[in-house]
């Protein structure tokens, strides 16, 4: 969990459904997609989501050779190049002629906390 004050941009909490760490402001968990609070105006009050980064790629095992094993790891670095988060997402194997597609996307919404994003918060 983050050391930020509750209600400030970037503050986190645990999803009660899947136990992933998510933004405190989230109305829907991005990991398990469960709704986190009842809000009759949920659709109207949602900030528009911007996807500033989306990468999709596939790997196909060639027709011959031993199976391939793969590990999917995501890391986040700040503007100084320091790694601030690293997470193993999944592992698996590909046999001959099998294919897997991987998609990485970063979704951003306007922070609705009381403090501005430029108020000295670093992450």
Image (cartoon, rainbow, N blue to C red):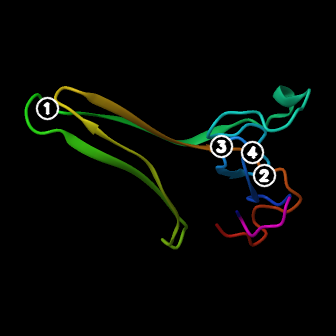
- Look at the image and give the residue range highlighted in magenta: 2-6
Residue lying at 7% horizontally and 32% vertically, measured from the top left:
64
What secondary structure is found at the residue carrying circle 3?
loop
Q: Nearer the viewer, mark 3 or mark 1?
A: 3
Helix, strand or loop under label 1: loop
**Alpha carbon separation for disc pair 3 and 1:** 36 Å
Q: Earlier in the sequence, mark 3 or mark 1?
A: 3
Classify mark 2: helix, strand or loop: loop
Proximity of marks 4 and 1: CB atoms separated by less than 8 Å: no
| Sooner in the amino-acid sequence: mark 2 or mark 1 | 2
The earlier-in-sequence mark between 4 and 1 is: 4
Q: Nearer the viewer, mark 2 or mark 3?
A: 3
The residue identified by callout 1 is 62
**Label disc, if present, on residue 24 of the rendered structure:** 2
Circle 3 residues within 10 Å: few <14, some 14–19, many ≥20: few
Query: Would residue 104 appear left or right of 16 to someone viewing this image?
Result: left
Q: Would you name the residue on which mark 3 appears?
A: 18
Mark 1 burial class by Cα count in 10 Å: few <14, some 14-19, many 20+: some
Residue 13 sits in quarter: bottom right
The residue at which mark 4 appears reads as 16
Residue 59 position within the rendered picture, expressed as x and y whole percent measured from the top left: 27, 35
x and y percentages locating residue 71 in the rendered image: 34, 49
Residue 79, position as x, y percentages in the image: 54, 68
| Marks 2 and 3, how far apart at CA | 15 Å
CA neighbours of label 2 inside 10 A, class few (<14), some (14 to 19), many (20+): many
> Furthest-left residue in view?
64
Q: CA distance from mark 4 to mark 1?
A: 42 Å
The numbered mark at residue 41 is none
């Amino acid at each position: 969990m983050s050391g930020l004050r509750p209600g400030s941009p970037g503050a986190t909490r645990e999803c009660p459904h899947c136990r992933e760490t998510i933004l405190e402001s989230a109305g829907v968990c991005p990991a398990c997609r469960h709704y986190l609070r009842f809000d009759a105006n949920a659709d109207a009050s949602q900030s528009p989501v911007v996807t500033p980064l989306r990468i999709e790629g596939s790997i196909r095992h060639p027709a011959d050779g031993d199976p391939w094993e793969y590990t999917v790891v995501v890391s986040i670095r700040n503007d100084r190049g320091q790694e601030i988060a690293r997470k193993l997402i999944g592992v698996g194997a590909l046999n001959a002629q099998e294919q897997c597609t991987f998609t990485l996307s970063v979704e951003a919404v306007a922070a609705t906390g009381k403090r501005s994003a430029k108020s000295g918060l670093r992450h």
